[in-house]
Image (cartoon, grey):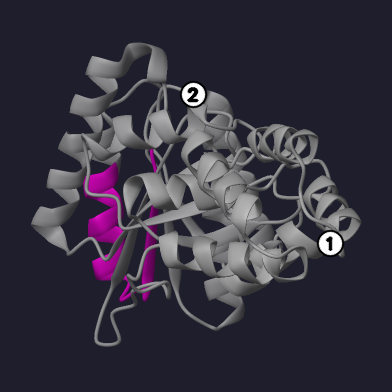
């Protein structure tokens, strides 16, 4: 994220010339903020005083974000259910495990559902995480109906008086039609037994603008209520979290900052923007 901060620091005290503006646009695009944000920020740089540019850009980015609630929606009087969706390889299953660990550390009773039944590695991974954390994992036979696993998980969660149910789902985007139908079916089956409090879309922070297209595809199948951006570390360009929220109007709620079980944090837009613009 450092190139933007370096640029703004270098510009302090002098007006932006055409070469500066061209460089700024290039940095913004490379930061995965997207073309629309880039054009608007370059326009700000063209007319704003250099020593006020960071504050002007900060205000603009904040104003472009969703005004919807960022805190995870929790049912304080019964079972809270999370449906977690996204493309395979984005860190979806790991995000499920990190959420489970968070709630388990809060002494909540957690049940996980391995509903990505067509990918044995995902089921094995979730079972390993469940054993490590100490939470129950509901699985089915290989290639079994994901909706059947979801049904069994809801029954297990209700029977065991669990506080939290988190369902991992398939993300085979190359079979888009089947996947969307499958997700819709899973959501309907779950909704028959308990309300879905959050549908979280997991976005790989390194995929750039492709992540926005992915999110739009999944939103066609299920009503996404929040976004979790993964792989946000020193190598991530960073701007995609802001770009996807602007494009979809859906709040980013969680950020994955590492591989550890506790490396999933609540999204703080003010801090995130400040780091994007000022961290060297």
Image coords of residue 208 (percent x, y)? 59, 32
Image coords of residue 159 (percent x, y)? 25, 69
Camera-side mark, 1 or 2: 1
Image coords of residue 74 (percent x, y)? 34, 77
Tell me: residue 78, above or below residue 269: below
The circle on residue 58 is none
Name the residue that disc number 1 marks.
Answer: 279
Marked residue nearer the N-terminal end (1 or 2): 2
Name the residue that disc number 2 marks.
Answer: 119
Secondary structure, mark 1, is loop
Q: Residue at x 30, y 60 (%)?
A: 156
Q: Give the CA distance from mark 1 to mark 2.
A: 39 Å
For the residue carrying disc 1, how many other residues have a C-alpha within 10 Å: few (<14), some (14-19), or many (20+)? some
154 vs 56, nearest the viewer: 56
Q: Is residue 41 visible?
A: yes
191 vs 240, nearest the viewer: 240
Q: Which residues are magenta?
A: 150-169
Q: Quadrant of residue 171?
A: top left
Q: Residue at x 88, y 52 (%)?
A: 6
Residue 161 sits inside the magenta stretch:
yes
Residue 78 sits inside the magenta stretch:
no
Q: Residue at x 19, y 52 (%)?
A: 190
State left or right for residue 50 relative to residue 176.
Answer: right
Image coords of residue 165 (percent x, y)? 36, 62
Q: Is residue 170 visible?
A: no
Q: Residue at x 22, y 49 (%)?
A: 223
Query: Which quadrant would the C terminus be assigned to in this image?
Result: bottom right
């Amino acid at each position: 994220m450092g190139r933007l901060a370096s640029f703004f620091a270098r510009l302090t005290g002098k007006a932006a010339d055409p070469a500066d503006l061209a460089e700024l646009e290039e940095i913004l695009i490379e930061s995965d903020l997207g073309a629309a944000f880039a054009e608007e920020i370059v326009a700000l740089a063209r007319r704003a005083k250099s020593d006020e540019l960071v504050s002007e850009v900060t205000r603009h980015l904040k104003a472009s974000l969703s005004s919807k609630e960022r805190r995870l929606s929790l049912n304080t009087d019964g079972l809270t259910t999370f449906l977690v969706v996204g493309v395979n390889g984005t860190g979806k299953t790991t995000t499920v495990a990190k959420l489970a660990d968070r709630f388990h550390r809060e002494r909540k009773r957690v049940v996980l559902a391995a509903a990505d039944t067509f990918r044995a590695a995902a089921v094995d991974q979730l079972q390993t995480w469940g054993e490590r954390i100490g939470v129950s994992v509901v699985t089915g036979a290989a290639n079994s109906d994901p909706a059947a696993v979801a049904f069994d998980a809801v029954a297990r969660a209700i029977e065991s008086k669990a506080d939290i149910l988190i369902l991992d789902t398939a993300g085979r985007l190359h079979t888009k039609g089947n996947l969307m139908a499958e997700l819709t079916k899973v959501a309907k089956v779950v909704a028959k037994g308990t309300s879905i409090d959050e549908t979280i879309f997991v976005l790989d922070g390194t995929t750039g603008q492709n992540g926005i297209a992915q999110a739009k595809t999944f939103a066609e199948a299920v009503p996404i209520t929040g976004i979790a951006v993964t792989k946000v570390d020193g190598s991530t360009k960073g701007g995609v979290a802001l770009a996807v929220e602007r494009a979809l109007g859906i709040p980013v709620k969680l950020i994955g900052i590492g591989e550890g079980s506790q490396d999933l944090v609540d999204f703080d837009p003010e801090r995130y923007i400040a780091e994007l613009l000022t961290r060297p």
